[in-house]
Amino acid sequence: MVELDKIFDTKIKHKGIFNFSDMYNALYDWLCDSGYDVNEKSYKETIGSGGKELKIEWKAYKKVSDYFRFIIKVNWTIIGMTNVDVEIDGVKQSMNKAYLELKVSTVLEKDYESRWEGRPFFKFLRTMYDKYLIPARIEQYEGKLLGEMSELVAEIKAFLSLSTRR
């Protein structure tokens, strides 16, 4: 069985004006540029009297070795999204106004190909491998994943900060 170690998770909330399509593309591009394969698990859109509601779930994978893989999960919740015209530097642009909540979490996945799960003895060996032979490597990958998570969160906050200053 694959072993998952949750490293970090956070929630980012924003209420106001931002460009949804630009943000969507910027985050997708950041994940791809960082070596992740992004899989959109679900995209649900409903239109109500208060505007659009969106629920989007991404799961991004990055193989870092034959034994370890990084996973970043991004869950979007957007409530009451409406289109608004905003004047930026004397030019009218179409943007979105909504309540946005992004839940971002990271997982370090060990033995993601389940190579050590064939027999109980192999599972025992994997436990010994993790506990006694490679704890420093596990800590190194956890630190690297935490660093990537911090970069992603900073990217999101910077994008939202720029959107509100316009």
Image (spheres, helix red, strand yellow):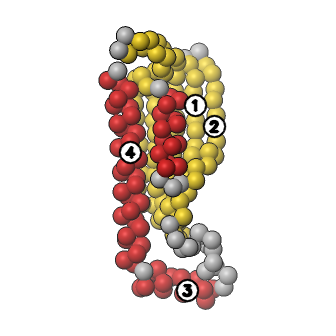
Q: Which residue is mark 4?
A: 153
Which of marks 2 and 1 precedes in the sequence?
2
Q: Residue at x 34, y 31 (%)?
A: 161
Give the distance between the C-alpha atoms of the residues marked 1 and 2, in whole angstroms: 7 Å
Task: Please name the amino acid that badge 4 sits on.
Answer: Val
Task: Please name the amino acid that badge 2 sits on.
Answer: Tyr
Task: Please name the amino acid that badge 1 sits on.
Answer: Leu
Is residue 19 placed above or below 69 in the rendered structure?
A: above
Task: Please name the amino acid that badge 3 sits on.
Answer: Phe
Q: Residue at x 61, y 89 (%)?
A: 121
What is the total number of numbered labels drawn onto the structure image?
Answer: 4
Q: Which mark identifies residue 43?
A: 2
State the image coordinates of residue 2 (x, y, percent, origin top left): 59, 70
Which of marks 4 and 3 precedes in the sequence?
3
Q: Which residue is mark 3?
A: 124
Which of marks 3 and 1 precedes in the sequence?
1
Q: Which residue is mark 1?
A: 54
Mark 1 Cα shell of 10 Å, populated few (<14), some (14-19), many (≥20): some
Mark 3 Cα shell of 10 Å, populated few (<14), some (14-19), many (≥20): few
Name the secondary structure under disc 1: strand
Q: Residue at x 37, y 10 (%)?
A: 90
Q: Quadrant of the N terminus?
A: bottom right
**Mark 3 or 4, closer to the camera:** 4
Do we see residue 108 in this rendering? yes
Residues at badges 3 and 2 in contact (C-beta under 8 Å)?
no
Q: Quadrant of residue 141?
A: bottom left
Name the secondary structure under disc 2: strand
Name the secondary structure under disc 4: helix
In the rendered structure, the answer to whether residue 95 lies left or right of residue 59 reads left
Residues at badges 1 and 2 in contact (C-beta under 8 Å)?
yes
Give the distance between the C-alpha atoms of the residues marked 1 and 4, in whole angstroms: 20 Å
